[in-house]
Image (cartoon, rainbow, N blue to C red):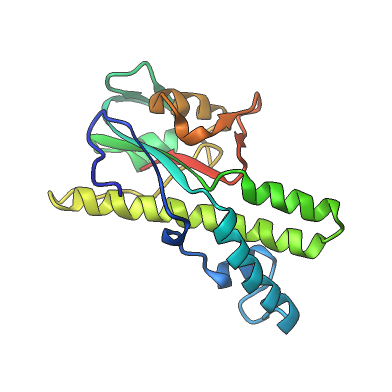
Amino acid sequence: MCEKISIGNLMVSTLVADNIDIDKSEVCRYLGYEKEKKPSAHVSSLIDSQILEAYKLMKPSYSCVIKEVENIDGSRISIKGTNVVFSSNIIARRILYKRHKVAIFLTTIGSKLEERALQLMDEGEMLKAVVLDAIGSEAVKGLACWLEGNVRKMVATNGTKVSLRYSPGYCDWDIKEQKALFRALGRDLARVKLTEDCLMIPRKSISGIM
C-alpha cells in the first residue's frame, strides 16, 4: 500500500498482480477497436485467455516519493532538498501552480510479459503477441491509476487536492527530463533503467508526477 509514503521518503514496493485492474474494453481500444465495433468471438476469447496469462507474467512494482516544491521561476521548477530542476511551462503554470508538494513516481509491470510477447512473435503467433502487448499497456496504466488513487486517499485527510498525472514526453515536457525524474527518485527505481534516448526498460513502465 501507499500509506507509508511521507515527505522526502522514498517508497519502493511490489504488488500482487491481482491488485491491477485490466479493462478489456481498454485493451480493445489499444487494438484499434472503436466503441461501436466489437472484436470477433475468436479475438474476444483470445483477449480473455491472454489477460489470464498476463496476470501470471506481471511483476508490478513502484517507486514514489513526495517532495516539497522549493521554487517556480518561469518554466523552471526546483525540488527542495535535491539538485533536481524540472523545465516545463505547462507543469509550472498548470500542474504545480500554487501547489507546495509534488509526488514523483515510477511504475512497472516488469519484463516477463514483453519477453513473452517477443517469443510469440518469433513463433509466428503475431495476433496473440499483439493482444498480449496491448494487455501490458493497459496493465501498466492500471498500476499507475492504482498508485494515483492511493496518493489521493493519503492526502485527502487534510483536504489536499491532487492534479492529474503528467509524464515526460507529454506536451512540452521533454522526454530527456526522465533523467531529472530518476535523480529525484534516487535508489532502486523499481528495477527500471533508462536508455541513452531516455526510454524506459522494461517498456511497460510509466513515470511522472502529480
Q: Answer left or right for 172 relative to 158.
A: right
Farthest residue toward the front? 56
Instruction: State the residue at coordinates (43%, 54%).
Output: 16
Report which quarter residue 13 is drawn in: top left
Residue 194 to residue 165: above or below: above
Q: Answer left or right for 62 relative to 204.
A: left
Residue 68 to residue 129: above or below: above
Report which quarter residue 70 is drawn in: top left
Instruction: State the residue at coordinates (26%, 39%).
Output: 5
Q: Is residue 75 visible to the viewer in this orientation of the structure?
A: no
Front in this rendered view, residue 12 or 57: 57
Front in this rendered view, residue 171 or 184: 184
Residue 9 to residue 154: above or below: above
Q: In which quarter of the image is the C terminus?
A: top left
How far across and down, in percent of the image, does residue 29 sit? 62, 67
Farthest residue toward the top? 83
Farthest residue toward the left? 158
Front in this rendered view, residue 159 or 199: 199
Instruction: State the residue at coordinates (45%, 61%).
Output: 18
Q: Answer left or right for 53 relative to 173.
A: right
Front in this rendered view, residue 175 or 94: 175
Q: Is residue 97 visible to the viewer in this orientation of the structure?
A: yes
